[in-house]
Image (cartoon, coloured by chain):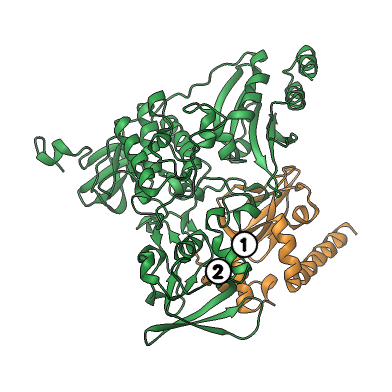
Chain colours: A orange, B green
Amino acid sequence: MTQLVELADELESLALFADLSRPQLEATAHSFEETWFGEGERILREGLTGTGFYVILDGEVAVRAGGRDAAVLGRGDFFGEVSALLGEPPSADVVALHSMRCLHMAAPALHQFLLAHPAVMYRMLLDQTRRLRTTTRARG
Amino acid sequence: MARAGDREHVERPFPPGEYPLVVVGSGPGGLQLSYSLRRLGVEHAVISADPAPGGMFRRWPFFQRLLSWTKPYAPAERGTRAYERYDWNSLLAEEAENRALMTGLMDGTSYFPSRAEMELNLVAFAERTGLTVRYGCRWESTRRETTAAGERFVLETSDGEYRCRVAVFAVGVAEPYVPPTPGLDLVPHYAETRSAETYAGQRIFIVGKQNSGFEIASGLLPWARSIVLASPSPAKLSVVTRSLVGIRARYLQPYEDHVLAGGVAVLEASIDRIEPIGSAFHVTVRPSAGGDPVTFEVDEAIAATGFVAPLRDLPALGVATYGSSRLPAQTPFWESATVPGIYFAGTIGQGATGLRKHGLPANSGAVHGARYNARLLAGHLAEKHFGATRSRPPLAEPELLPFLLDEICRAPELWHQRAYLARVVSVDPTDGIADEGFVPLAHFLDSGGSDAIAATIEADADGGLYPVFYLRRSTRTEERVLPGHPLNDFGTAEHRRAVASLLAELGLASAEERAQGAGTL
């Protein structure tokens, strides 16, 4: 169980939100919905519309494409931003490897949230850049 | 244990003992579930701490008027299945005389029933359908026990111990919650608000900007000298989110007062502390946008800080919870995700979130969503735990197109539980075409199974409604989004052609049928 004040404490420890002030953290805790998934449950489903953006608070997920796990994400990682920002269905499933707790924000709200919090957008861009570099190196 | 001949035993049903299934709660969720279980012949006991049916509606909303409407005059005939779309408050009955009971109890002054009318509606449903509940029996604690007959849950109550294989908790989300903000425990919670006239001429500070906060503000508008509502994030409005998320239109008057500078202030700020100073309070807030803290001197502060699910010791038993309302984590069929055999019904079932497509939740937190969940849950319990066989009426191929069109046009389950419940038709090559009834959409998408088609109604981020079909072929499921309609009429020639085309993908619709669909233009 997490109440919003404690949730703001948790957000403070995640790199994505490291630049936010305390009032901004509390507002962010209000803006996201906390949600929970059981082991094996699909969070994103390949090809289905209307998904959102997720930040992992506890647990791990696998990004599963073509029957194999392309990546494993854990606490502090986020996913769903590509389909949320581009307005396209996900190109892979994201599956909970264990019971996991995360924050959820719908795509339209994410647009507004990022514009209002450029520091979070910058952190997200850094992470995306690292992922792109890793992918490029792997292909090279 | 009650004794035979005991006066209490004669007058009160379900004495402590062993039952196949125990339902805790006599609000709308418990009543709907018990009714549906009885229709399926599943033996069970119902216990409730309350003295009579109604659950939270025996007490709330505080200002005695619901947020859920019932339209006595609607586009569909009263008492029909299609009418349920316009009646959010009646429970579901098979018998015609027990349907749409809410309509007969309203005085015509509002299409939002009063709290008292809603309570009467639930009492009438229980009485007319012959539901029996052991009232005045408080569930106090829970444990597991291994017996020769297998695993049992033991529910300790004020009347004694109940043993059961399956327990369903329909206990609402109505336990007041106060966050650990310094000083907030010194002021009354929403649940302790006094009568409005006692706030005459006072400066009021309301912590929280959800419906309960705005309900209080609305009720105090004629009495308060000034009102401040504050919470860290901007107020969401249901007319903007186009869902039940956000402040409902009925409570928007304080918001209009705020934007027209009439004396109400709606702030984005976190509450730092509340300090009693003489007969007043100093409330210090920190604006979310930054800047220095601001202190308000007010005569009264009220914590409209929400409610949590009263799960007692279930978390200690292993029931995982999450979120600000401490909802139990649940499977798509409302079973605890971590303790099999424990289920939830009523508003607490909103913990099974479903897909939340475009961020929109189902209406499981309200009666008009929870009543369908409860009916499905009864069928699921009967099948999974008590050996019942689900009815799967066969459908002839020519019936399929009109059947699916009718469902997306009229099925209240789909209109109220959007992107959450689906009408499923299996198209197994050996078993033929069969109506599988309603299924949680998440279950349909993730459970696999024979080739099938699932029909839903969904909404996008702009609130537009449209039918969506999911085609499952050889374990792969694909989504097909149909167009919306300005008047939400999904029975047009365009929709008919689209559904015919989907059926053709499953090898079901003949060219003649598609031509017939096109010919209705």
Q: Which residue position is annotated with label 2?
A: A7
Dot 1 lies on which element?
loop
A37 and B13: which is toward the camera: B13
Indicate which disc residue B85 carries: none
Residue at (68% x, 60% y) in the render: A73
Q: Are marks 1 and 2 on the same chain?
A: yes
Above or below, A71 relative to B466: below
Q: Which residue position is annotated with label 1?
A: A32
B114 and B223: which is toward the camera: B223
Quarter of the image for the N terminus of chain B: give it.
Answer: top left
Above or below, A15 relative to B327: below
| Amino acid beneath label 2 | Leu
Dot 2 lies on which element?
helix
Above or below, A120 relative to A40: below
| Circle 1 Cα neighbour tier, 10 Å, few/some/many (<14 / 14–19 / ≥20) | some
Residue at (27% x, 45% y) in the render: B52
B165 and B346: which is toward the camera: B346
* Spot occupied by residue B353 in the image (x, y as percentages of width and height): 56, 48
* Spot occupied by residue B440 in the image (x, y as percentages of width and height): 56, 38
Which quarter of the picture shows residue B410? top right
Residue at (76% x, 52% y) in the render: A83
The answer for which chain carries disc 2 is A
A53 and B73: which is toward the camera: B73
